[in-house]
Amino acid sequence: MRFTRGAINSTKKLLGFTTTSRNMASNKILNVENINPNVITMQYAVRGPIVIRAVQLEHELAEGAKKPFKSVIKANIGDAHAMGQKPITFIRQVLTCVTDPSLMEKGDFPSDVVERAKTILGGCGGQSVGAYSQSTGVDVIRQHVADYIEKRDGGVKSNFDNICLSGGASESIRNVLKLFINHSSPKPIGVMIPIPQYPLYSATLAEYGLGQIGYFLNEESNWSLDEKELERSLSESLKTYDTRVLCVINPGNPTGQVLSRKNIETIIKFAHKHKLFLLADEVYQDNVYAQGSEFHSFKKVVSELGDPYNKLELASFHSVSKGYMGECGLRGGYVEFLNLDPEVYVLYKKMCSAKLCSTVLGQAVIDAVVNPPKPGEPSYEQWKKERDSVLASLKERATLVEKAYGSIEGISCNPVQGAMYAFPQIHLPARAVEKARSLNQEPDFFYAMQLLEATGVCIVPGSGFGQKDGTYHFRTTILPQSDLFKDMLDRFRSFHTKFMEEYK
Ligand SMILES: Cc1ncc(COP(=O)(O)O)c(C=O)c1O
């Protein structure tokens, strides 16, 4: 996808590049005039201008500035530990032991922790997490991932050779998308992504020069996905693009829906009919809260649908950043391929090998997640208690968010069936929309910035994820712990009432 000069210039403006700074920069060999233009145009709203301002506000508060609030509440990012969630003891004990094996000899750790740590170290070069691993990851950990997937999918076979570990799911997703860059293709390559979407996708597509093809999720039926919309989106895209990939996020970010089994079957049949490579982003597979909702992996459904659907080319992604563990900063994730052309897989591994390997400590976390304590092992009871308590608390907050936002006039909110977010719609008065436009801002950006300046609450405007024209949303996480959560809702409510009154 080529960006026009206009798009590049307006992004430069958004980033605050002034004429003066451009002139100064142009004396450098690499400057904003000659840098890869895709890097200028790519956007990542979850860490965009509102979040940058939130960080500034925190500094201003720390320096004693007077504000109408005492703290900034960051409900912008799905980072559970940053919002006060405590690490799972078992995971951190395994990490401690692999990091400093001498501690294992002192007898302070449960035997299952020591056994896991020794197994991981046994797979590491020189028995140390300080050694590079193979580019695909430590074999014994890949085998544990395969065992975990097989158990999750009720016995559907998983081969460790089809699994590659990575620094978070993001790295795997970006690696797989990179395979589709092909500048000699007569038409640009297109990738279908949901709208609203998680901006890793739009940002990566922009960076790689791949075409972004949005298919709208249906807000009226709880962000479900319908075949007609997939067909519309694909057939329109074919005028411009050679569309070869379909991405699905389940459970959804930012929309918090869990796809029904029927929906998943529809998607698989659609991908098969149109010869699309399917990317299944399943990083929230443990985060399902609503009664009647259940996580179905694409791999399992593909396998159960049988011939010819079980020939579908599929890449499915998982992460240690979400679920009950929320170990975002340790960077662990993986991709499992199904039916990938073996020659392509050789090239994929070659491409990964140029980056040597993902962090081995991140790989150790993956191991602790996919190979948790079993009933009867010494760590089991505590691990179960900690895991269940995090998931129960997330479930409670999922219901609370939906009810709280849904009860505010001028806001409607679908149930949060899974993941870590709500994506409420704000019914903005026409005068607020006009005011935002007069400032050259998206209306929901204007709303979110006003909210931040007035209350210190940081949310992400819906325009950063994509939404139907004329509708406005915001994404909030369900992650703030109970007291903070209550405080956030109080601040939000009072701001919203004043805002609606001012612009009615
Ligand atoms: C849908 C989705 N996919 C992928 C990721 C990236 O996860 P990781 O931290 O494993 O890179 C996120 C993070 O929020 C996400 O929401």
Image: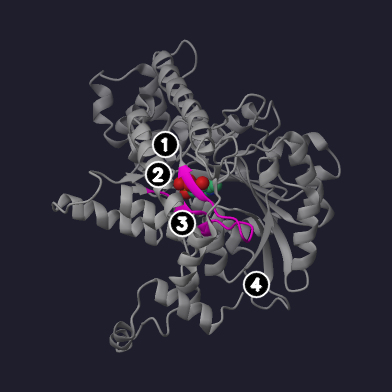
Does the magenta portion include 61?
no
Q: Would residue 234 appear left or right of 172 to someone viewing this image? A: right
What element does badge 1 sit on? loop
Q: Residue 449: horizontal and vertical position, in percent?
A: 38, 57
Is residue 5 visible to us here?
Answer: yes
Q: Residue 497: horizontal and vertical position, in percent?
A: 43, 45
Q: Residues within 10 Å of mark 2 (few under 14, many from 20)?
A: many
Mark identifier at residue 75: 2
Amino acid type at circle 4 is Asn
2 or 1: tag closer to the N-terminus: 2
Q: Residue 317: horizontal and vertical position, in percent?
A: 58, 45
3 or 2: tag closer to the N-terminus: 2
Spatial separation of the CA atoms under disc 3 and disc 2: 25 Å
Task: State the residue position of label 3.
Answer: 503
What element does badge 4 sit on? loop
Q: Residues within 10 Å of mark 1 (few under 14, many from 20)?
A: many
Residue 306 to residue 498: above or below:
above
Foreground: 62 or 304?
62
Task: State the residue position of label 4.
Answer: 182
Task: State the residue position of label 1.
Answer: 479
3 or 1: tag closer to the N-terminus: 1
Foreground: 12 or 312?
12
Does the magenta portion include 469?
yes
Mark identifier at residue 62: none
Amino acid type at circle 2 is Ala
Which residue of the protein is positioned furthest toward the top in this rendering? 376
Residue 288 to residue 463: above or below:
above
Q: For the magenta stretch, what is the residue range? A: 458-476
